[in-house]
Amino acid sequence: MSRSSHLSCTLLAIALAATLAPARSEAQFTYDPAGDLVAGSGSGRADSMVYAPDMRFPIRDAPAFANSQVWGVGGSSGPSGSQCDGRNFSYPWHDNYCETRTWDMPLCPSGTGHQGQDIRASDCMAEMHPVIAVVSGTITNVGSYSVYLTAADGTRYDYLHMRPVLVTSGERVSQGDVIGYVANEFGGTATTVHLHFNIRQNVTGVGSVYVPPYMSLVRAYERLVGGSSGPRFAATYVHQSFPLSSEPFELAPGTVVDGYLELRNTGSETWRPGETFLGTTEPRDGASAIAGPDWISPSRAATIDRVVAPGATGRFNFSVRAPSAVGSYDQFFNVVEEGVAWFGDDGGPPDRWIELLITVVPGTDADGDGVAVSAGDCDDGDASVHPGATDRCGDGIDQDCSGADLPCDVDAAVTARPDAWSPSTDPSDAGSSVPVDAPDPRMSWRGGGASGCGCRVGSAPAPRVLWLALAAIGLGLVVSRRRHHRG
Ligand SMILES: [Zn+2]
């Protein structure tokens, strides 16, 4: 058929379509899982692998509907009705790879089955809907109802039932070129108007076989209906344990800090340990000055810690080591699919986005107590304060840098309120001049005498014990007086 006569066919078909076409679905694209065949149509293969990640969807325009012909409405084993029934032109999609057939199919649970996926265009009209080359390659066969397109990597894509076919055997085509139209060509006998699509690849240990095309079609279709080709490799920030670059991250020379960066996979490709890495950027692959001892190489901080499907999150666990020279060290990172792509060249983030900014500070020890600030001295102006020092309870000073002053009682309620331990007068008895260097009686009073100093170490000086004893007596007076008032 010449191009001009095809055009007039098309114009006629458009006129017919206006009355015959089922209502187009405006619904959001949905699909049933790989391997879920129509009940009674055989055993599917639950295989979510995308065997052809770079291919385009074979029917040029959306919507299109992957589903069963034989078990669909109007099919020989399906509900009675017309092939043009709207139920055949609606989401969700259904896998029909491995649907009951007699063909040998090593990857199908039963060993036989349907070799590919049947796809309807937006309506049931033949010769209306352009079919395109899903990848660039060579047309390796044009049969009575089949066209093979073979890519440089050896993958073969089979298109069945097109009419007219616009390519010839041996012809080079580019991805997106129109190669024919959806029709019902079947070597003289009729089939339904649809495109049957196969992917044939060499599978290790099996040989050259028809692989499940369903998820490759899903991904390609998602890119089609997304309006543009969505990125294969993309990540967004979720969380990190290291300080953000906007916050101080000061380390003494040689200090090693463990941490992680958590990202979400917003591309279409699954991340895998050993394939997806956190690499240095600005410049890419530069040897990092802050590489920790666990880095894979000076330019690879870590690989992803788990298999991360699109939409899921994963972590890069790695350490950084402060260089020996004082100063600021700015290191940028990006995710890299090793040997395939930097994320900055596909869906992002940009290379100057994931950043660790480390400031190396001298290991100072101004008070000469033998412990530098960087090593945990919480008061570098007081030689009696440093990790390892003896903490005197109740003096409001955290001598041992534990994070809080040592309480003078083990009472849990009081321990939770260290402020109740500072010397004060009983606020409920403001007129009294009796000092109460003891727990707030409302919290710790146990009805008997005061328990005295609960210090863990016997370092409280004797006058202090005396002072506390006086305080206990004072407390007794206070409580006793209240009892009188209540009476
Ligand atoms: Zn088919």
Image: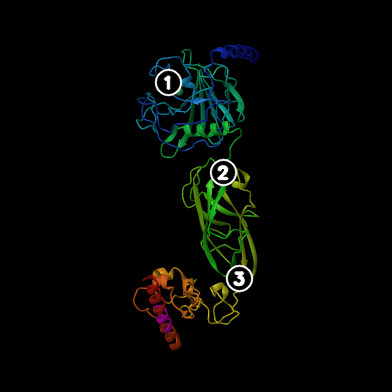
Q: Which residues are magenta?
A: 470-475
Which sits in the foreground, 91 or 442? 442
Residue at x-position 40% and y-position 33%: 45
Q: What kind of element bears circle 3?
A: loop
Which quadrant would residue 151 be assigned to in this image? top right
Can you say whether 223 is above or below 467 in the image? above
Asked if the residue at label 1 sits under 8 Å from ligand 1, the reply is: no
Judged by depth in the image, the label closer to the viewer, 1 or 2, is: 1
Q: Do tag 1 and tag 2 residues touch (Cβ < 8 Å)?
A: no
Quadrant in the picture for residue 464: bottom left
Question: Can residue 386 be found in the magenta stretch?
Answer: no
Report the disc number at residue 72.
Answer: 1
Label 1 vs 3, first from the N-terminus: 1
- For label 2, the crowd category at 10 Å Cα-Cα, with few meaning under 14, some 14 to 19 and many 20 or more, is many
Q: Which mark is residue 324?
A: 3
Looking at the rendered structure, the kind of residue marked 1 is: Gly
From this view, report whether residue 363 is shown above or below residue 282: below
Quadrant location of ligand 1? top left
* Disc assigned to residue 233: 2
Give the camera-side residue of 129 and 6.
Answer: 129
Tell me the amino acid under the disc marked 2. Phe
> Residue at coordinates 39% horizontally, 69% vertically from top-left?
412
Q: CA distance from mark 2 to mark 3?
A: 36 Å
Residue 434 in sight in this render: yes
